[in-house]
Image (spheres, rainbow, N blue to C red):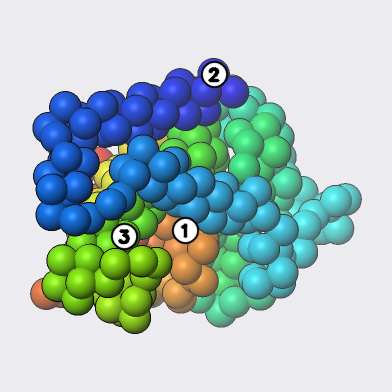
């Protein structure tokens, strides 16, 4: 809870500082001089509400959404030796990581994959595919579980939601400044907003949204290295490397966008696509773990 409070306080400070800098730099006066009657303070507040509402609502329902989108069967009472091993392994790792016991689930998929989600560290969900249980050894599967538990322990779900909220705020804020300026200065709309405002705002949001996605995905890739390091601490570096090498041999299947950032592996990427990847290439992650060993 302290981590969330500090992150929220930091984001609020960023927004307040941005508003102060805009006034200090005289941007509002410059816009007024050009006939652009725009209250930047109110616009910034509106952008923050819009930007954070979507990301927090998505975070709040993430576990519920994941269960239904992936068809996760939560293990209430283990029905066989494999389920018993899963629950006991996650319980032990959660205790070592200092978090509450997550719900443990299994979803049907021939591809090896796993993910973690949830709005709170002490009320999360860790789920693995049937394909992962069938294609990996117990040691490798334990490392994958440790990777997902580390995501939870690091607070990655909340962090990503907050980062998404910040970039969403900037997208909404800047897009509306551009739209308002074009509408007033270029098309000379004197009252209200004309079609130029809406068209320009939508186009600006699309372009800025792509740039914002690049930023969010960069943070997502950095957290994968941290989760790998956490997995190595909980399950052993050799097992973590072995699990990633197994994934190299059998590409894990794609997860829905809402869970992709917290899966064990992402799809291959090249060219511009690599800037939009949720996960670093597996070879980079393996190299990073080996470098830590050295």
109 is higher (above) or lower (below) than 42: below
In the displayed structure, does residue 106 sit left or right of residue 264?
Answer: right
Element carrying mark 3: helix
Element carrying mark 2: helix
Q: Quadrant of the N terminus?
A: top right
In the displayed structure, does residue 244 sit left or right of residue 126?
Answer: left
- For image coordinates 38% across by 62% down, the residue present is 265
Asked if residue 281 can be seen in this view, the reply is no
52 is higher (above) or lower (below) than 73: above
Q: CA distance from mark 2 to mark 1?
A: 26 Å
Q: Where does label 1 land, which residue?
A: 263
Q: CA distance from mark 1 to mark 3?
A: 35 Å
Identify the disc placed on residue 2: 2
Q: Position of residue 16 (x, y in %)?
A: 34, 28
Q: Quadrant of the C terminus?
A: top left
Which residue is outermost to the front?
190
Q: Choose top left, top right, bottom left or bottom right for residue 68.
A: bottom right
Comparing labels 2 and 3, the label whose residue is closer to the camera? 3
In the displayed structure, does residue 84 sit left or right of residue 246?
Answer: right
Q: Position of residue 226 (x, y in %)?
A: 34, 38
* Most foreground residue, 150 or 206: 206
Q: Where does label 3 land, which residue?
A: 176
Looking at the rendered structure, the number of numbered marks drawn on it comes to 3
Identify the disc placed on residue 211: none
């Amino acid at each position: 809870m302290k981590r969330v409070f500090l992150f929220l306080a930091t984001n609020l400070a960023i927004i307040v500082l941005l508003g102060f800098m805009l006034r200090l730099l005289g941007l509002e006066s410059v816009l007024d001089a050009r006939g652009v009657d725009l209250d930047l303070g109110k616009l910034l507040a509106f952008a923050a509400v819009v930007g954070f509402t979507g990301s927090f609502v998505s975070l709040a329902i993430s576990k519920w959404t994941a269960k239904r989108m992936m068809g996760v069967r939560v293990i209430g009472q283990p029905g066989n030796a494999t389920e018993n091993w899963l629950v006991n392994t996650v319980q032990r790792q959660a205790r070592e990581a200092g978090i509450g016991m997550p719900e443990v689930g299994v979803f049907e998929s021939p591809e090896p994959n796993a993910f973690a989600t949830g709005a709170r560290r002490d009320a999360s969900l860790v789920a693995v595919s049937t394909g992962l249980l069938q294609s990996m050894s117990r040691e490798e599967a334990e490392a994958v579980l440790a990777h997902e538990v580390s995501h939870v322990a690091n607070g990655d779900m909340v962090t990503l939601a907050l980062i998404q909220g910040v970039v969403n705020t900037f997208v909404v804020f800047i897009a509306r400044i551009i739209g308002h300026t074009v509408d007033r200065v270029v098309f000379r709309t004197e009252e209200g907003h004309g079609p130029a405002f809406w068209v320009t705002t939508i186009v600006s949001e699309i372009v800025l949204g792509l740039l914002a996605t690049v930023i969010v995905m960069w943070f997502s890739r950095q957290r994968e290295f941290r989760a790998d390091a956490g997995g190595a601490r909980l399950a052993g570096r050799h097992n973590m490397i072995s699990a990633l090498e197994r994934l190299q041999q059998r590409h894990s299947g794609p997860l829905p966008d809402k869970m992709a950032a917290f899966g064990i592996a992402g799809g291959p990427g090249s060219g511009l696509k690599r800037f939009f990847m949720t996960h670093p290439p597996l070879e980079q992650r393996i190299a990073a773990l080996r470098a830590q060993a050295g």
